[in-house]
Amino acid sequence: MRQPLAWPASVTACALMLCLLGVAGCSSLPSWWPKPVDTSAAAAPAAAAASAAEAASPDQAVYRLEVVAPTPPLNVLLSTYLDLARFQNVPTTDGITTSELDRLIAAAPAQARALLETEGYFNADVKVERVANAGPGKPLLRIVVTPGPRASVEKLTLNAEGPLQTAATSGDATALQLQNTLRLQWALQPGQPFRDGDWSSAKNATLARLRADGYPTATWKDTSAQVDATQNTVKLDLLADSGALFRIGAFRIEGLKRYTEDSVKRLANFGPGMPYNEKLLLDFQEKLQTSGLFEGAAVEIDPNPDTAEAAPVLVRLREQPLQQATFGVGYSANTGPRLSIEHTHRQPFGWEWIAKNKLELGPDLKSWSGELTSYPLPGNYRNLVAGSAERLRSAEELRTSWSARLGRTQDTPRIERLYYAELTHVRLDTVAGTSNSDAVSGNYHWVWRDVDSVLLPTRGTTLSAQAALGYARSTTADNGPFGRTYARLTWYHPLGDTWYTTWRAEAGQVFAGNTVGVPDTLLFRAGGDDSVRGYGYRTLGPVVNGAVTSARVLFTGSAEIARPISARYPAFWWAAFVDAGNAAGRWQDLRPALGYGAGLRWRSPVGPLRLDLAYGQDVKRFRMHFSVGIAF
């Protein structure tokens, strides 16, 4: 007889465990497994409530909140940072309970008073109420704020210790002036309202000023704002530790390969032993960046207190390429299409000079210009040798000219100056014949800019002025002395946040005897893209024998208003404008020609590109003005 099979005890135990796990796992079967349906009447309301909960928006607010405060800033403050404000849009699935809501309501007055204290209100009264009969929808909670009087600064005590105080005590004028400046420029003066934000900003600004004016390791040793809530006053007490006065030491220059250290040091208007000043270093850094020699420059002082008496000046540079060429294609309504080639050599023949040459080729304009400028000299001056040649066809005439210049330039962040002597030759071929004229002159050009952006200005002013004295010779007129002046003023002014206006005026005059033949390049005409739109380039001036000629006086003006086409494309603007002006032999003979129209602008990274349709009232016709250039 066969014996029953005996299972080991361990196998039996494993089988029992698997059965228990299988039973427990039934509760986690997928949702598609059929479930029994409760069809009883008692189950119907529960099912309806569940369906409504599932249909509700997950971002549905559980209550409404209304903040009533006397000023909008307080309303915004409480509506943003109160817990009641932050939790009113909690997802329904998180299920704020009645007890949790009661806790938020109870905590709201204390939270609100703490927030109002940051704005200087130390006696605020805050009430939270549930509004009955607030209409359909979610329950309404209302917070009513009576802020009370705002605290003001009663007393300010601002002192320093350390080397700054030691120098001031000994009568050092610079230290005394710095201490006085720190107190005068402190933002929260007695009598002014107190705010936590202003308190922090004032401390940061004062410490930054102290560090920038010779004490780069300065810190606050103690600061306190003592509030008297009963009197709504605040006493401010501050003590700064100035740290050591740093003095300029030796230069440590990194990144030079082809340029000399002297070409770098010449741009610094400070030297060893001078007290450290942050503005001196920033001005030095800007000069390096605009010198034409470096792609990037960073200047800083070594803040190690151990070397404060002669702190090294660290100069990190990245040089420009030795040679650079740019090829371009462009179009202007003034002179038509063009090809251009530019070449720059930053050390020709091993000299410390920069050579630039530019060639433009087009059907109406062919030109070459070249200049040789020295590396920056003390005072940011440069020596200049320049020349140009041009062949321009416009208004039924052909002008061939050349010039040579010898002078100096000076560039500062806002002002450019140019002094030079010039020799000029012009040949003019017109329907009336050919004339040749020459001039030698001394010239001064001055440019001042105060704008928010040199490339794409929207606010500020630019002014360009020129003056010249010289002697002219001509084959068709008398020889003799002459003087010349010219000025151009442009004012950029926004109207609100989206409208922008540009106003321009220019005027010029040549002073000479009536029969003296001044070269055509020194005389004036109007018309064209940057003059009076609606008229061709250089087509406005006196008409002699049926041909437009250059004149001795000039005046033009322009008013333009523009705004972005849409907030989505802020770089694309539309514009409307009115231009007027002309050139004449005498002021009493000047009759302004009027042009007006509309256009489009693209404020590209390389500058504004314009497309204008203008109507010239005197010629009674429309003219398109379009200027665009692409470099590659």
Image (spheres, helix red, strand yellow):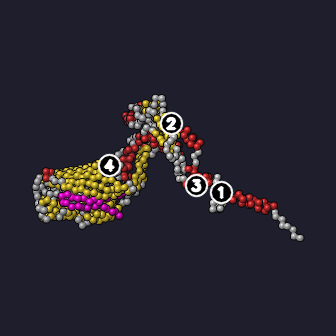
Q: Among all residues in the image, which is located at the extreme right?
A: 1
**Badge 4: few (under 14), some or many (20 or more) residues near its Cα, within 10 Å?**
some
Asked which secondary structure carries label 4, the reply is strand
- Point out the stretch of residues depicted in magenta: 603-632
- Type of the residue with mark 1: Asp
Task: Please state, as top left, top right, bottom left or bottom right, where the N terminus lies in the image.
Answer: bottom right
Q: Is residue 543 above or below residue 135?
A: below
Visible residue check, residue 341: no
> Residue 576 location in percent, x, y?
28, 55
Residue 359 is covered by the magenta coloring:
no
Question: What amino acid does circle 2 point to?
Answer: Lys
Residue at horizontal 49 percent and vertical 44 percent from the top: 135
Amino acid at circle 3: Ser
Residue occupied by mark 4: 494
Q: CA distance from mark 3 to mark 4?
A: 56 Å
Q: Residue 378: x percent and y percent?
A: 32, 48
Please name the residue that numbered disc 2 is placed on.
Answer: 127
Q: Label 2 vs label 1: CA separation?
A: 49 Å
Residue that mark 3 sits on: 51
Judge depth for marks 3 and 4 and give the one in front. Answer: 3
